[in-house]
Image (cartoon, rainbow, N blue to C red):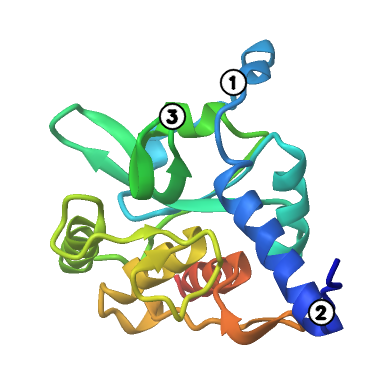
Amino acid sequence: MKSIYHKPQELARSLLLLLLGLALSGTIACTSHHRDREMIAIDTTTLRPGSLILRRGEGMLSTFFSKIASEEQRYSHCGIIDYDSTSHRWVVWHAYQDSSLGADGIFRQSLDSFVMESEAIAIYPALALDSLGLQKMRAYIALHRPGGQYPKKFDSRFDQRDTATLYCTEFVALAYCATEIPAYQVQPTGHNVAIPYAYYTLDDLTKTVSRLHIQK
């Protein structure tokens, strides 16, 4: 049988991309044991459309991803909070993949459901987002969600060079950039020996929003 040899960097990159893909697509799905613990309480009276929400899921791979997603190593996934005036409820837009839910790309989920699948939650209010910026953000989401003019699939390869796909932090970063508000122009700073290009991290998002808090 013919032996197959891989260069160390190529093997490391393949393994990392596999783990990242599994972490992004598999560990954020709902699991049954979350019903055995108390629901995380969210004060909806303080919520603002366009706010950043972070969470850590319940699976082992979610724990793995939290270790490389940010310096704090507390969260593994993110989305954008919005208010649905039709159903009169808060929702979360996030890049997600779950065949059982029919989700593959930008997915809308109720805030309650999003929180129920989480072991930890953090919310960063969109303090500098005005009505025009929010309108542009919503337009970006509408254009790129499934059924939109430029639908995006979920990026299980974690590769922002692929313009037809989006992973969770990339989606939020580009949605913020679409507001055209200077303070919301997020730059990718993530680096890894196995990935030869910069990528968006949770820190890129939280540091951008945190600067807005300080400026306020």
Query: Which residue is label 1 attached to?
Result: 39
SS class, disc 2: loop
Query: Which residue is label 2 attached to?
Result: 6
Question: What is the spatial separation of the Cα atoms under label 1 and label 3, in whole angstroms?
Answer: 23 Å
Mark 2 crowdedness (10 Å alpha carbons): few <14, some 14-19, many ≥20: few
| Res 75 visible | yes
Residue shown at the point (47%, 62%) measured from the top left: 155
Quadrant for residue 186, please give it. Answer: bottom left
Q: Nearer the viewer, residue 11 or 115?
A: 11
SS class, disc 3: loop
Which comes sooner in the sequence, label 1 or label 3? Answer: 1
The residue under label 3 is which amino acid type? Answer: Ser
Describe residue 25's horizontal placement relative to residue 109 as left or right. Answer: right
Question: What is the spatial separation of the Cα atoms under label 3 and label 2, in whole angstroms?
Answer: 35 Å
Which comes sooner in the sequence, label 2 or label 1? Answer: 2
Query: Which residue is label 3 attached to?
Result: 100
Foreground disc of the pair 3, 2: 2
Which comes sooner in the sequence, label 3 or label 2? Answer: 2
Describe residue 174's horizontal placement relative to residue 14 as left or right. Answer: left
The residue under label 2 is which amino acid type? Answer: His
Q: Residue furthest bottom?
A: 196
Q: Mark 1 and mark 3 in contact? Answer it, CB < 8 Å.
A: no
Q: Is residue 3 above or below residue 144?
A: below
| Res 131 visible | no
Q: Nearer the viewer, residue 158 or 66?
A: 158
Q: Mark 3 and mark 2 in contact? Answer it, CB < 8 Å.
A: no
- Give residue 77's position: percent from left, percent from top: 57, 51
Question: What is the spatial separation of the Cα atoms under label 2 and label 1, in whole angstroms?
Answer: 46 Å
- Give residue 136's position: percent from left, percent from top: 18, 67
Total marks in image: 3
